[in-house]
Structure formats: C-alpha cells, structure tokens
Amino acid sequence: MARKVVGFGEDELRSLAGDRSFERGLGYVDAVSGLEVGDGSVTAVVHGTGVYEVELTLGKGTGVSGWCDCPYGQEGNFCKHCVAVGLTVLGQAAAIPRQRAAARARAAGLEGWLTALSRDELLALVREQMAGDRALRRRLELRAATTHGDLDTVRERILALVDPRPFTRYGYIEYSDAASYARQVAEAADALRALIVGEQAMQAVGLAEQAVVALDKAYGEIDDSDGVVGQAARAVAAAHLDACRAARPEPQQLAEWLVGHVLGGGGKTR
C-alpha cells in the first residue's frame, strides 16, 4: 500500500542507492528531522557527521530521485541520507496524500495572494524582506547590477562572495563555517553564469579568473572536511570554462593564465 501511495518502495531505494548505502541508510532513520512534504517533493534534514539537507522528488506516476548536500550526494549519488528520508516517507505513507494536497493548497494560496498585490505592495514586501535578510539583498543587488551591466558592482560583489575573511575567526575557516562560505562561493558561480547569459562572457572570464585565484589562496586555510567548498569552487571553475567557450579569449593569453595558475603562480587576471 505504501508503494502505491508514494510511488516507490524499499526495492526502489535499494536499487538507487546500492546495497551498502541502503543498509547504512537504515541506521540513519532516527536522525531524520524537519520532514516537509510538498506537492512533488519532500525535504528533510539528516544529522550524521554533519547536518545534511535532503530533497526527494516524487514522480507524478512512479519513481523517486534524490539530492543531498553531503559530499557523496553532491557527486550525483543516491546516498544513505536519501535512503533514510525515503524510508521515513514510507513509514508515514498514509499521511502523504493529505500532506501533498495541503502543500498544493498553500502554494495556490501564496500565488493568489502575490498576484493580487499591487506593484507598490510587492515592492514594499521585497524591501521588507531585504531589510531582514542580508543575503537576499546581496543576491538582488548582484542580479540588478548584472542586468544593468554595472560591471564595477558585479566585480565587487563576486570578489566579496569569495572573500574568506568574514568567516575567519582564528586565521582560518572552521568546519562549522565552511558550509556558509560554500554557499557564497556558489552564489559567485551563479553570478558568473548570469554574465555569460547576458552576453558579457569576456567580462565573466576575467572575473572568474580572479575568483579562482582568490579561492586557491583561501583553500589551504579552510576545514573543508565535507568537501562543500571544493564543490562550490569547481562550480566557479566550470563557469570559467563556459565563459571561455562563449567569449573565445585570445588563446595565448588564456594558455599563459592556465599554465601560471596550474604551476602555482596564480596567472595574470584580465
């Protein structure tokens, strides 16, 4: 009955995770908290060696897919934490249809309320949220600067996002602060991609190179035991690659930067 209600069962979880991760996931069921059921997804937190966020996407018919921000999950694997959340969902399967219906109703209510607001009311709401959420304000400022082609502000914001100093208390970033710093680095990668989409790929090349150099200097002073900063740094490197593919920078200059960077000289940024 549980499989029919949620679209998957233990066999699917074992198949996705493999025997080893499935068996390890059994031991993490009691570590699942904050289960929140949406219309087509379930989110939860799993407490292990760290605190990991998990999202399971439930298919319209059958099937399930999962994402977790643990290092193994970020490599694209259906990890033990995903298994634990999946088993928790199966254990509460009878309540899932009601919870999904409630989630649809909440989403519809929110959409209806936002749609009914006037322009001035929406602006007031956004300003209110920005006043209480520094990260949101920073993201919106960066998006506005990217849209308006304000490259000085974009450069300032991206370099601020990869700057480790706000997170260093004793000359290095402790394990407890690594995830917060990684989120900022991931924001920088998103901003670089926005520049590429906005047909400012050449500017993105130079900014990405500056960000990569800054991250390289910082990484040796970070307790990145879970690999989250490394994952975000790879996203910045991937944005640099995408920018180069779009902008087609002068090959010799790019080669000199790459060689200088790989050999530890940092390379000259544009």
Image (spheres, rainbow, N blue to C red):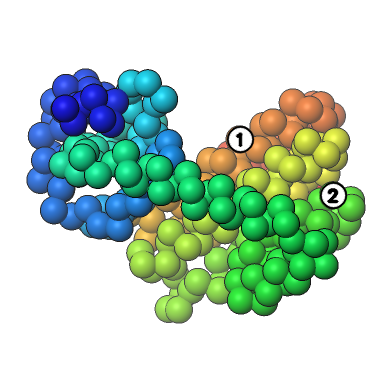
Q: Quadrant of the N terminus?
A: top left
Residue 253: image quadrant is top right
Q: CA distance from mark 1 to mark 2?
A: 22 Å
Can you see residue 69? no
> Sequence-wise, which precedes: disc 1 or disc 2?
2
Which residue is under mark 1? Answer: 238
Q: Secondary structure at mark 2?
A: helix
Q: Residues within 10 Å of mark 2 (few under 14, many from 20)?
A: some
Amino acid type, mark 1: Ala
State the image coordinates of residue 148 (x, y, percent, origin top left): 89, 52
* 104 relative to 207 in the view: left or right: left
Residue 56: image quadrant is top left
State the image coordinates of residue 34 (x, y, percent, origin top left): 30, 58
Which residue is under mark 2? Answer: 147
Residue at the spot x=74%, y=43% of the render? 194
Q: Nearer the viewer, mark 1 or mark 2?
A: 2
